[in-house]
Structures are given as C-alpha cells and as structure tokens.
Image (cartoon, rainbow, N blue to C red):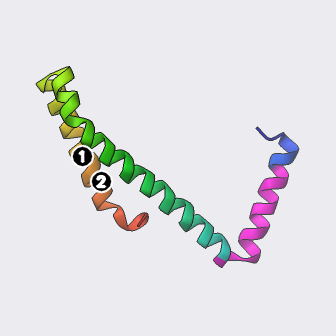
Amino acid sequence: MLSKEDQRRFEQITRNLRESDPAFFARLDNRSRMRRGRMLLLLTIVLWAALPATTVLAGRLAGAVYAVLLVANTALMWRYRHRWV
C-alpha cells in the first residue's frame, strides 16, 4: 500500500507520462491487456481439462453445469478476442 502522498505522486507521474508520450503509454496498456488475456485463456484451458474429473467426482449434474458455464465463458472470450490478442 502506498501512502496518500505517494499515491498522489504516482498518479501525477502517470498523468504526466500519459500526456507527454501517449504512444508509449498506449504500448504499455496494450501489453498488460495482452498478458491478462493470455492468463484468461490459460485458465479456460485448465478448466476445460478439469471438466472430466469434476464430472466424475461431483456427478453428472455438476459436470453439466460446469460445462455450460465453460461454454459461456469460451463464447465470451471468442466474442471479445480482438481486445486482448
């Protein structure tokens, strides 16, 4: 946690950087968005891989609910893929 003064300074530095070099700031923003998207993709893959084990351990109904949620998640990721790829 930053102190109030440090937080204010950080926001001021960030604001100055955004105003003085918007291209650099945009590259940093895109890089973090891509990293976050890759982590979401990896998490989705791991959850899909865990679906059979979940179905066996928790039952067919839980597996079906899990699968429906994963299909919705995958559809949303596919729909908004241009934002993080």
The residue sitting at 75% across, 62% down in the picture is 14
Q: Quadrant of residue 55?
A: top left
The amino acid at mark 2 is Leu
The residue sitting at 74% across, 73% down in the picture is 19
Q: Main secondary structure of the magenta part?
A: helix
Residue 72's label in the rendered image is 1
Quarter of the N terminus within the rendering: top right
Quarter of the C terminus within the rendering: bottom left
Number of residues whose C-alpha sits closer than 10 Å to that of mark 2, classed few (under 14), some (14–19) or many (20 or more): few
Q: Which residues are magenta?
A: 8-23
Labels in figure, total: 2
Number of residues whose C-alpha sits closer than 10 Å to that of mark 1, classed few (under 14), some (14–19) or many (20 or more): few
| Above/below status of 1 relative to 41 | above
Q: Quadrant of residue 4?
A: top right
The residue sitting at 35% across, 63% down in the picture is 81
Q: Is residue 80 left or right of residue 39?
A: left
From mark 1 to mark 2, how far is it between C-alphas?
6 Å
Q: Is residue 16 magenta?
A: yes
- Which residue occupies the foreground of this view, 60 or 53? 53
The x, y position of residue 46, in whole percent, is: 32, 43
Residue 76's label in the rendered image is 2
Q: Is residue 25 left or right of residue 85?
A: right
The x, y position of residue 42, in whole percent, is: 38, 50
The residue sitting at 60% across, 71% down in the picture is 26
* SS state under label 1: helix
Kindly give the residue lying farthest to the left in the view shown.
60
Q: Are marks 1 and 2 in contact (CB under 8 Å)?
A: yes
